[in-house]
Image (cartoon, rainbow, N blue to C red):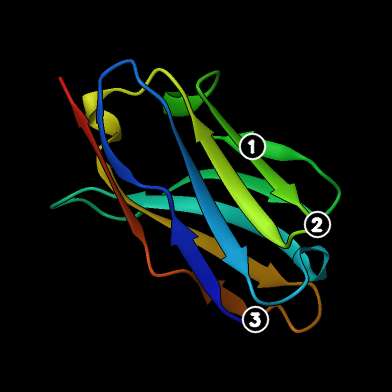
Amino acid sequence: VQLQASGGGLVQAGGSLRLSCAASGRVFSFSVIRWYRQAPGKQRELVAGITSGGNTNYIEAVKGRFTISTDNAKNMIYLQMNSLKPEDTATYYCNAVKSLGFKVYWGQGTQVTVSS
């Protein structure tokens, strides 16, 4: 299974971006899918997650601004990011855990830069 993230870029504060993550395997075969981010000099942190049952969770810093979703037909994972802030600047990674065997997969990361 491979995960290919895309959609990052440079945006002004208050703007929006939609990150995409293309999975080579079936999205419904994952028990949980997550987006992480890592800012320069900081540890990687979990941003949002969605289970195979559709339950979502978000860190407090992005609640109400970010939305994680999947398109099982297209094997795609999305992170819609609205009202972006400079502190959202980071490299964003998609992550998925297989339902059988719990193997973990990572995408290669996509850079998001929010200017003030």
Check the picture and name the quadrant holding the N terminus: bottom right
Q: Earlier in the sequence, mark 3 or mark 2?
A: 2
Q: Are marks 3 and 2 in contact (CB under 8 Å)?
A: no
Image point (42%, 48%), residue name: 7
Query: x, y percentage for residue 88?
Result: 30, 33
In the figure, 78 relative to 59: above or below?
A: below
Dot 2: element: loop
Cα distance in 3D space between marks 1 and 3 = 21 Å
Image point (66%, 70%), residue name: 97
Q: Nearer the viewer, residue 104 or 91?
A: 91
Query: x, y percentage for residue 4?
Result: 50, 68
Residue type highlighted by circle 1: Asn
Image point (39%, 70%), residue name: 108
Q: Earlier in the sequence, mark 1 or mark 3?
A: 1
Cα distance in 3D space between marks 1 and 2 = 19 Å
Check the picture and name the quadrant holding the C terminus: top left
Residue 87: quarter of image: top left
Q: Label for residue 57? A: 1
Residue type highlighted by circle 3: Lys
Q: Extreme right residue here? A: 53
Q: Label for residue 103? A: 3
Residue type highlighted by circle 2: Asn
Dot 3: element: loop
Image point (29%, 43%), residue name: 9
- Please indicate whether residue 54 sits to the left or right of residue 116 in the image: right
Cα distance in 3D space between marks 3 and 2 = 19 Å
Q: Earlier in the sequence, mark 1 or mark 2?
A: 1
Query: x, y percentage for residue 70?
Result: 71, 49
Q: According to the image, label 2 marks what residue?
A: 72
